[in-house]
Image (cartoon, rainbow, N blue to C red):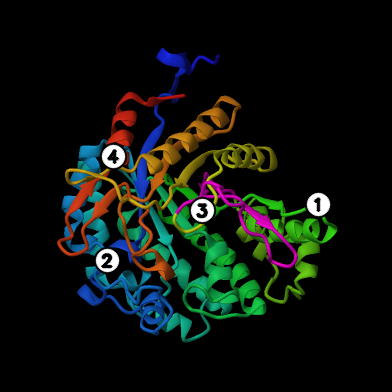
Amino acid sequence: MSSSEIASSEGSTRLTFPDGFIWGSATSSFQIEGAPTTDGKSPSIWDTYCSVPGNIKDGSNGDVACDHYNRYVEDVALMRQLGFDAYRFSIAWTRVVPDGVGAVNSAGLDFYDRLVDELLSAGIQPFPTMYHWDLPQSLEDNGGWVNRDTAYAFADYTEAVVDRLGDRVKTFTTLNEPFVSANHGYVVGEHAPGHTSMEMGLAASHHLLLGHGLAGERIRAGAPDARLAIVINFTPLEPATDSEADRVETYHRNHLENHWYSDPVFGLGYPEDTADHVGWDRSEIQDGDMEIISAPIDLLGVNFYTREFASADDSFELPEGTPQNTMGWELHPPSFGKLLRWINDRYDVPSILITENGCPMPDNIRDENRIVDDDRLDYIRSHMAQVHGAIEDGVPIEGYLVWSLFDNFEWAWGYGPTFGIVEVNYETLERIPKKSALWFSESKSQNGFEIS
């Protein structure tokens, strides 16, 4: 038994995290802010995508969401009550540079200025993300991430934010989940802007990473004492069967989903055989791009939710009885621990922060007015136990941010899936912490918890 594991009663074990371990939660701008036209904000690709009938499962949009733009003081007070060390949020490009390029909108920046000050006054470390999928529609009209110019526009927008917040923010994250931006938005069409072209998706993938590198240069210049981060989602893949076809499918999907973004950031370049396999001519790569993309970062944000099985004929279905959440994703905590060790073994990562981990659950059990979400609580606890085990094995993980603070707009799924540890009543907008939030708060206060 390690020094951070203490035997407890009735066969359970107490896991204690290292001193200074960060406990917190995460959100994104479009999913919670609302206020779509307030203080000069312009439409993003998600405003446009939501306006097309059939794109969102419940026909909803982000016009109100959690109304965080108007309720941020209340929301920060709740985070303080829960004892958070940190809060990861994203900044809406369309608030700061409404046209995507050109004039900076001071009124939009003012909101994030106030939010950062409110967080710091509450003793909560702000972790802003510059891009969480809500591209200005004006840039999409000119080709979006398929257009190389968008990467430079992103750098200019980042510079404007850093100029305003860099005196107080200690960590800036460039992109959230570039795989989802490129694949879901440009290849399979499940997210805004809704294109279905592998060629567009590959171009977008490179320009997103170029944008990361260019924005990183602005962060280094404008806030030299701040840390530079990128957030990448990883989904471990296994072949559905032992067939050669399934093994080949797994190999290339693993490269596209789990290597394509992290490999270039850490100087390993794109997976060449998979680039050939999908027919990418690499015409988007210009001299110096890969050096810009692979400039050192200080922190890797890791998002994890589930593992997947790859089948060449796309016929695989989870066996009946497999634990899964309300979106049909398998619950498999050991894959998380295995992933964290793989990242540490493959890359020279200075530090890792778990920037998203969570699950939508039925939330159909109440005790008086509180949702009793023991299933979500078990998910968080079992995944945090995997984090603890990885730390014991030398993986440099500095903290864990649960996704999400609130029930919110879950992209193409609308308001159906509820990821939050805090319930939001969408009629009254009242926030009510679920049982999982109270458990997380208590565990944070003790910097650990018991597990059977």
Magenta region, mostly helix, strand or loop?
loop
Between marks 3 and 2, how big is the CA–CA gap? 26 Å
Mark 3 or mark 1: which is in front? Answer: 1
Residue drawn at x 41%, y 31% is: 21
Amino acid bearing label 3? Ile
Residue drawn at x 79%, y 56% is: 247
Q: Quadrant of residue 270?
A: bottom right
Position of residue 208 in the picture relative to residue 166 (left or right): right
Looking at the rendered image, the quarter that the N terminus falls into is top right
Whichever of callouts 4 and 2 sits on the residue coming sooner in the sequence is: 2
Residue 48: image location, x then y, percent: 38, 82
Amino acid bearing label 4? Lys
Query: Mark 4 highlights which residue?
Result: 435
Query: Mark 3 highlights which residue?
Result: 230
**Image mark for residue 242:** 1
Between marks 3 and 1, how big is the CA–CA gap? 35 Å
Q: Is residue 415 above or below residue 16?
A: below
Whichever of callouts 4 and 3 sits on the residue coming sooner in the sequence is: 3
Query: Mark 2 highlights which residue?
Result: 65
| 88 magenta-colored | no
Is label 4 in contact with label 2 (beta carbons under 8 Å)?
A: no
| Disc 2 crowd, CA 10 A, few/some/many (<14, 14-19, 20+) | many
| 299 magenta-colored | yes
| Secondary structure of residue under mark 2 | loop
| Disc 3 crowd, CA 10 A, few/some/many (<14, 14-19, 20+) | many
Whichever of callouts 1 and 4 sits on the residue coming sooner in the sequence is: 1
Compare residues 213 and 273 and report the one nearer the observer.
Answer: 273
Amino acid bearing label 1? Asp
Compare residues 209 and 51 and report the one nearer the observer.
Answer: 51
Q: Is residue 101 visible?
A: no
